[in-house]
Amino acid sequence: MIGCDPEFVLRLNRRFTPSPYLLPDSLHEPIGTDGDGRTGELRTSPAEHGKELFNKIETLLTELAGQLPPGYTVLAGSSHKTRHRDHYNWVVTTGGHLHFSNEHCTSRYFFNLLDTYLSIPTLFLESYPQNKVRRLDRSFGRPGDYRDQSWGIEYRLPPSWIITPRVAKIYLSLASLLHHTFNKVRQGRLNVGLVSLEEPNYFNAYCEARLSVFENELPWIKEGHYKLLRAYHERDKKWVRQGLGLLWQCIDTKWQWNESLAVQKSWRLKNGGQRPRGHLTVNTNDDFLSGSSGSLTDTVRELSFTQNLFVYGLRESRGNIIATNIPGFRSAAHEYFPDIEICGPVIDREGLTLGIGHRLRQELVTFRWEQLILTLEDCGIIERGEE
């Protein structure tokens, strides 16, 4: 059996939106949040063939689009820079992990088969330099990146291939082809060349996406693909043959995918969810916020809150602190508040909270309200209203 859990990024108005704001924060739902708490993930049930798995992915993508409010885009591929105001400052990576369940799939021989006939040729389709950023700078998807699981192995080299239907078909065709012909290769009944990307002369070249190192390997890899195809007798053979044809057509024409392409556009999907709405609650029952609560109310009059947010004041002794449980707030606030310490919440209240320290409150009556608004926008808590 084969399976997968490709990751994706959510974006609104060119700004990254952490997936827990819109999707279940669960590792067990078919559509949910990845373990990093930032990216989303599709989790299909296992399938016997690549075509069946492709159909499951298409179904989940349709469901995902149906859940998303208008304006949100889904991005896949290798890596994405998140936008803060008018420039970029950090990177979110996405993987397209493939799962294999076979009594011999934990063999080094099988990894070499995947390296040779899946990862090397598809490297020519990946968008550069985003693939280099994922593997070299962030250390994801490097040769040897796999995990043993109770059901088999998780092969983690590929980026998120759900970026277009064509790319998805290529990857799943290869996965199905290699999974179902491996035993013949292992038993010596099918003789094809193999390399390991963990070899020193290939490792760095793969991470750096130096295609010239692998160009001489392409002719015999292509020959091996079609030798494997002749030994492939599953019911989706025609579909797999089409996937191989697409792969080599892309390589011959030097086609590479566009990382900025919205998944909804390439799969012809339409968002159907309602934009989430929330409200702001300001604690004015004590003097911790002093006169700042009026400033806050005036400033956010044109803003729409996508989450319920409770704002409260911190005692004067905690003058240089923001206390919050908003996911991603620390990273988002670094640009706007480099001089402020950010810690966990100090108030026991359900939902999202934001505690404002004494020193910052004195400054918020002027320009720093705008910095706070930008941080909340970057975290997906609010959005600008119509001017």
Image: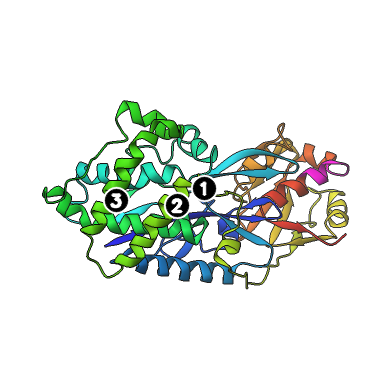
**Residue 192 placement (x, y as % from top left):** 21, 45
Q: Is residue 159 left or right of residue 283?
A: left
Q: Secondary structure at mark 3?
A: helix
Instruction: Name the residue: 67% across, 39% down.
Output: 88
63 to 381, vertically: above or below: below
Work out whether residue 186 or residue 155 is closer to the camera in this orientation and state it. Answer: 186
Q: Quadrant of residue 98?
A: bottom left
- The label on residue 225 is 3
Work out whether residue 369 or residue 8 is closer to the camera in this orientation and state it. Answer: 8
- The label on residue 255 is 1
Q: Label 1 amino acid?
A: Trp
Q: To which residue does mark 2 refer?
A: 249
Do the residues bearing badges 1 and 2 touch, measured as CB atoms within 8 Å?
yes
Q: Label 3 amino acid?
A: His
Quadrant occupied by the C terminus: bottom right
Q: In this figure, what is the number of numbered marks?
A: 3
State the CA–CA distance, disc 1 to disc 2.
Answer: 8 Å
**Residue 19 placement (x, y as % from top left):** 56, 57
Q: Label 2 amino acid?
A: Gln
State the CA–CA distance, disc 1 to disc 3.
Answer: 19 Å
For the magenta stretch, what is the residue range? 364-371
